[in-house]
Image (cartoon, coloured by chain):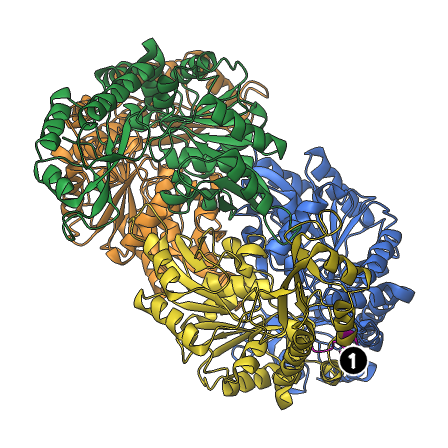
Chain colours: A yellow, B blue, C green, D orange
C-alpha cells in the first residue's frame, strides 16, 4: 500500500525494452543520437508545434530551473504560488540557475487566480530600479495539491501574463495526468493558451528520470543548450534518455500510464468517499488525493501498512481526534488489490 | 571502426540486468534506496575508506563542478592544466557552481609538474584582497591527453598542494583505466596520496551515466547534498543510478571493463607502432592514443571508415603532408576485428 | 517642504571639513589609511566591542548584501519581513551576493513578532535536502514603516533566532535614529541582544554615502574583505570614506544629527495630530511619519509645495475622499519654518 | 617621494569646491539629480556621442565588472591579457558580476596584438556546447605596464573583435593619461575605433572615487541600471558623485590633471635615462615607469625615502646585483622637487 509518491514505482517493461534495444554499437553523444531525432519529431507532432525546440534532462528540478533561467534575467522576479515546487522543493535551484532572480509568491491557496496573479504582478516591477523587474509567470499543472486547472482557468492566467508581456512557464511534472484528466491535447494545454515553455514530465509517469523541455519559440534554443551543458545536465550517452522518452511517446504510452494512475486514484477516492471523518481537500481528477482525517485514523491506516505523507502535526503524538492531512499519490503500477485493501482498512476503522 | 570517444559505446549486459532487477515495486527516492546502501558500502570497501561520504550523479561535469564548489569559496581560484576538462569542456560549469571562482591554468603540456604547479600557486594568492585566494588543486587521471600519472608523480603534486594547505580534487572520469594501468588500488591512487575528493567515473567505462563522488573526509557531506539538490542533480528515482553503480562494483566489473579498454588500446598501438609517418604524442598505457600523421594518411583512414577526432588543421583541406593530430579512444566494447581493420588500413596506406 | 526622503539633504559642514582636512598628501589606499584606524577604534569604543571587525562601504544595499553573504550559504534562506529593504528595494542584491540564497518573508505587518518569526522558521528547513536550509534572521531598526522596536522586542526576536542557531543581521540604515529614540547605547541595541552583524548607517543621517558594517565576532572578517573587494566595494582612496565616518563619530555628531531629525518629526507630528481626517499608521518616535488622509488633502498639500511619497492609489485621479497613505521623512537639515508651513497648510485645508 | 600609486594622492581644490557647491538643500537621489544632467551632457559632448548612455559608479572594479556583465552571458568568455586588471586585481569581480563567465587570457607580454588576440579567439568558441561561447574583448588603455596603444593598434584589435562579432570593452582607468599622451579626442580613442563601452576613469586622475561608464549604444542602458542597483553601486546621494565628475569635465580639468601627471613622469624619466644599470621596461608616454635595476640600487632609493612597488624578488634579501623591477607612478599632485630628489638620489647612487 504505497501511496507516498509517484516517483517511487517501477518503470514499465516497454521502457526497459527500449533501453535494451538502443544499447547496440556506437551512437553519437550529447543529444546528437538518432533516437533523439525520433523524440524531437514525435514531440513536435504531439504538440502540433513543428518549430519547437525540444530538449531532455534527467530531473524536474533541472528542467524547471533551466527553463526559467532561459526566460528571465538575474534582476527579474518570477511569479508562482507559495506551494510551487520551484519554491518549496528545489533547494534554491531556480534562484541558482537564474543567477539570483527572485520568486514572488502569489498569495492564496493552491490554485492561482487571475485576480491574485494580477495583484502580485502589480506589487512588483513598479519601483523602477529599486525592485526586481517582472520576469515570468510559472504555473504548475497538475498543481502541488492535486488539482487540475481547467483550460479556461489556464487561459485566464496566461492572458494576465501576456497583458504584462510576461512569458509563461508550465511546470508539467504531471502534464500527462492533467491532459488525460481534461481530455485535451498537449497543444491545447500549452502553446494554444500562451505557454512559452512547457516541461513535459516523464519521471513521475513511469520513466527512470527523463523530462522534456519544450520551447514553442525556438529563439532561445541555443542559449538553453549552453545553459544545460553549463549546468552539467547534458548527457554524453544521451541515447539512454532518448530511448526512454521515445518509448514513452510511442503508442501513446504516456497517455496510457497517466490514465492508469488517474483511474487508480479515482478507484481509491470512490472507496473513501462515504467514510465519515474524512474530508477531501482537492478535486480528485488526476492521481493525487489530499484528505483530512483524525490522527487516530491515520495511525490505524499506517499501522495497517499504508505508506503516505502526513502533515499538519506529528502522527505519533497528539490527541486522537486532531485533524491531520494525508497525501495519497497513485502511480501507474499501483496494484488494485492494494487500493482495495486500503479502502477496506479505512472503512473498517 | 569507432574511436571517437569512450562515451559512445553500449553498456554491458550486467548493467541492463541490474536495471531490470531493481525495477521491482516501490523504493524510496532521492538516494534513500536500499541499493544505494550497497553502493556506499562497496565504495567504502573498495577505497578502504570506512568514513567516506559517497554520492552519485549522472554526469562528469556535475561531479566535478559540485565537488569543486564544495571545496572552495567564490573568491578563490582552482589550479588545473589548460587542457583540463573543467577548463575546456564544461562550458563554465565549474565557475557557475563555484559562484564565480576562477580557474588558474598551470602552464605547460598535458601533465602538471610540481615545479609548474608551485609556480602557478605562487603567482596567485599573494595580492591580498586584490587577487583571488588559493582554493584547490584539480588533477585529472588519466589526463586529457591520454597519459597516466605515476603514483610518485601524483604524490609530488599532492605534496605541493598540501604544502599550501590546499585540498586536492581528482577528476577520475577514467579512474578505472588509470588504476588498471598502474596496477594500484583505488586507495593508493586517492586518499593515500592526499586526494580529498575523487570522482570515480563510470560513464566512460560502461555505464549509461553514473559517476561517484567520494569525499574521504565526510565533514562537508551535507553541504554536498544540498548543493547536489540545488543543482538539480539529485535523482528522485535514484535506484536506477544505484543499480548501475552496484553492477559496476560487483565482481570487479569496473576493473574488467577498464582492462578490456586498455588492452584494446594496446593492441591498436602495437599495430600502429611500426608505421612510418606516425608519431605518438602520449604514452599509451590507458585507453587513448594521440598520434601525429600527415593529412593524407588521416584522409585515407577516415575515408576507409575510421571515426575519430582530428585537430591541428582542417582534415579536408590543406597540404597532403601537413601534420594533423588524431585522437583514438578505445572503449570496452570495441571489437578486435575493427582494431585490426584499422591497423591494416593504416599500414597499407 | 521636502519630506520625500532622508537621503536627499545636504551633509553637515563638519563632514565637508573632514574631507578637506584629510585631503593632504599621500595616503595608503584600500582601507589601510590612518583615518580608518581612528574610525575602527571609535566604533569599537562606541559599541564596547574591542574585537569587532569594522568595514566601510558606500551604500546600504552593499552593506546589507555583503553582510548577509558572509553569514549564509547559497542553499540557505534568510528570514525578513515583506517590507524589508532587502526584499523590496535592493533589486535582488541580497540574492546576488548570497549566490542565489532565498528570502523567506515573515508574514504580518511592519514589525516582526517572535510568534510570526517562529512560524516562518518552522515553515522552512524541515524538508531535508528539498527545501533551503535556515540561514539567518534580518531585522530592520528603524523599520521601513517608521516604527522602532523596543529593546525587549528585539531581544525576543534575537532569542528566537538563537534558539534555532541562526545568526542575526541588523539593517541599521537608521540605527542612530533608533538609538536616540530608545535612549540606549549602540551595544545595548546590538551585540548585547545577540546581533551578530550590524549595519551602522551614515548615509541617511548626514553622510554622502558611508555605512559601517560591524562584525562583533571577527571570525569572518577576512571573508568579508574578500567579498567586499569582489563586489567592487573596496575604495582605493578609502580615506574619503574614513574621513566622513570619523567626523560622524567625533563629538557624537551621529547622535546630534539623529536627535535633530527625530525632533523635527516630533514637531511635525505634534502639528498634525489634531487634524481631523488624518490617521497615523506608525508610532512616531524616530524620523518618519506614515499617515492616511483623503486624496483631496494630499492634493492640497502637494499643490502647496509639499514633497513626499503617496501610496495606495493615484494621487491625481480618483475620488476626493479616497484614502491614500503619505510618507513624511525628516532629515537633520529640515528647516523648522518648512515644517511649520506644512502644518499650517494642513490645518487650514 | 611617493610613486606607489596614482590612487593615493589628494583631489584638486576644484573637486572639493564642487562638493561644497552642490551641498545645498535637497536633491533627488539615485542619479536623478540635476548635476547628473550636466555630467551626461558634458560626456556626450566630449565623446561626440549624443545618444550615449552615461553612468557613474565609485570604483573601477565596479565599472569594469558591471560593463562586462551587461555585454556578455554567463556561458561566455572574455578575452584579455594575463596582466589585465580584471584578471589580476579584482578578486573575481568580473566572474561574479558576469554570473560565472570566464576570462580567456591572450598570451604574450603587456600589449595585446591582433595576431595573439585572433589566436586566442580561435582557441575558444569552436567546441559547440562544450566550451564557452565567445563573449567580448577587453582592452586596457593605458596598459597595466604603462604602455599606450596607438590608435592604429587599438583599431587593429577592435577590427579583430568586430570580425568575430564581439563587443569591445575599454578599461580606461587611465583614459585621460592615454588621450593626452596620444593627443587624440575621446571619440577617436573609443567609438570611432569600435569600442562599445568605455570606462572613463576619474579616480586615478584626481577624483575621490568616480568612474563614468559610457555605452555608445544605449540599447542596454536599462539593463545596466538594474545591474548597477543590484550590485549595490547606485548611490542614493548621487549628487556627490555627479559634482565630482562635473568638476572633472569643466574647463578640461581631466585633461589638465592628466597632462600634469604625464609631464611628471616625463620629468622623472628624463632624469633617470642616463643612469647606468637602469633598464626601462615600457615606453614612458603616460604616467608610469617600469624599470629594472639591481637590488642594491632599489635598496638605496627606498632607504632614501622613495616609496614604490618592487617585484621580481625580495627587496630586502638577495644578491646586491640581482635585478628587480620597480614601478613608479606619478599622479597630478606629485611635487617636482620630490621628483628631482629621486633623480638625484638615483644618479648619486
Residue C295 highlighted magenta (yes or no) = no
Q: Residue furthest right?
A: B251
Query: Which quadrant: the C terminus of chain B?
Result: bottom right
**Which quadrant of the view contains residue A152?**
bottom left
Q: Residue furthest bottom?
A: A251
Percent coordinates x, y for residue D66 in the rendering: 37, 46
Residue at label 1?
Answer: B339
Residue at image coords 56%, 23%: C218
State whether residue B91 appears in this view.
Answer: no
Residue C47 falls left or right of residue A268: left
* Image location of residue A202, percent across then percent down: 62, 75
In the rendered structure, the answer to whether residue B232 lies left or right of residue B215 reads left
Which residues lie in the magenta part? A332-338
Name the side, left or right, on which D278 lies relative to B285: left
Q: Name the secondary structure under disc 1.
A: helix
Q: Is residue C7 above or below residue A335?
A: above
Q: Is residue A127 visible?
A: yes
Amino acid at each position: 500500500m504505497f501511496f507516498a509518491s509517484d516517483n517511487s514505482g517501477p518503470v514499465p517493461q516497454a521502457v526497459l525494452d527500449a533501453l535494451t534495444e538502443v544499447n547496440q554499437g556506437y551512437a553519437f553523444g550529447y543529444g546528437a543520437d538518432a533516437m533523439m531525432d525520433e523524440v524531437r519529431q514525435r514531440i513536435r507532432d504531439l504538440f502540433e508545434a513543428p518549430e519547437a525546440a525540444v530538449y531532455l534532462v534527467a530531473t524536474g528540478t533541472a528542467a524547471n530551473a533551466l527553463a526559467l533561467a532561459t526566460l528571465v534575467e538575474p534582476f527579474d522576479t518570477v511569479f508562482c504560488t507559495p506551494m510551487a515546487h520551484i519554491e518549496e522543493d528545489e533547494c534554491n535551484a531556480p534562484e541558482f540557475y537564474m543567477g539570483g532572480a527572485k520568486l514572488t509568491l502569489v498569495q492564496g491557496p493552491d490554485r492561482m487566480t487571475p485576480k491574485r496573479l494580477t495583484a502580485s504582478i502589480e506589487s512588483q516591477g513598479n519601483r523602477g530600479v529599486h525592485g526586481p523587474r517582472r520576469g515570468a509567470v510559472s504555473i504548475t499543472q497538475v498543481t502541488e495539491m492535486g488539482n487540475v486547472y481547467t483550460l479556461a482557468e489556464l487561459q485566464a492566467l496566461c492572458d494576465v501574463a501576456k497583458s504584462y508581456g510576461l512569458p509563461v512557464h508550465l511546470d508539467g511534472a504531471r502534464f500527462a495526468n492533467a491532459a488525460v484528466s481534461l481530455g485535451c491535447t498537449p497543444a491545447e494545454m500549452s502553446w494554444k493558451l500562451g505557454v512559452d515553455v512547457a516541461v513535459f514530465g516523464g519521471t513521475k509517469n513511469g520513466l527512470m528520470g527523463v523530462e522534456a523541455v519544450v520551447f514553442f519559440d525556438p529563439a532561445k534554443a541555443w542559449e538553453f543548450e549552453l545553459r544545460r551543458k553549463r549546468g552539467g545536465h547534458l548527457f554524453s550517452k544521451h541515447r539512454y534518455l532518448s530511448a526512454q522518452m521515445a518509448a514513452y511517446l510511442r503508442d501513446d504510452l504516456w497517455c496510457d500510464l497517466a490514465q492508469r494512475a488517474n483511474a487508480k486514484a479515482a478507484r481509491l477516492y470512490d472507496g473513501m468517499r462515504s467514510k465519515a471523518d474524512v474530508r477531501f481537500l482537492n478535486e480528485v481528477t488526476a492521481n493525487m488525493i489530499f484528505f483530512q482525517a483524525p490522527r487516530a485514523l491515520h495511525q490505524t491506516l499506517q499501522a495497517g501498512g499504508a505508506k503516505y505523507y502526513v502533515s499538519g502535526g506529528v502522527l505519533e503524538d497528539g490527541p486522537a481526534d486532531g485533524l491531520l492531512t494525508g497525501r495519497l499519490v497513485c502511480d501507474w503500477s499501483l496494484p488494485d488489490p492494494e487500493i482495495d485493501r486500503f479502502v477496506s482498512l479505512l472503512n473498517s476503522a
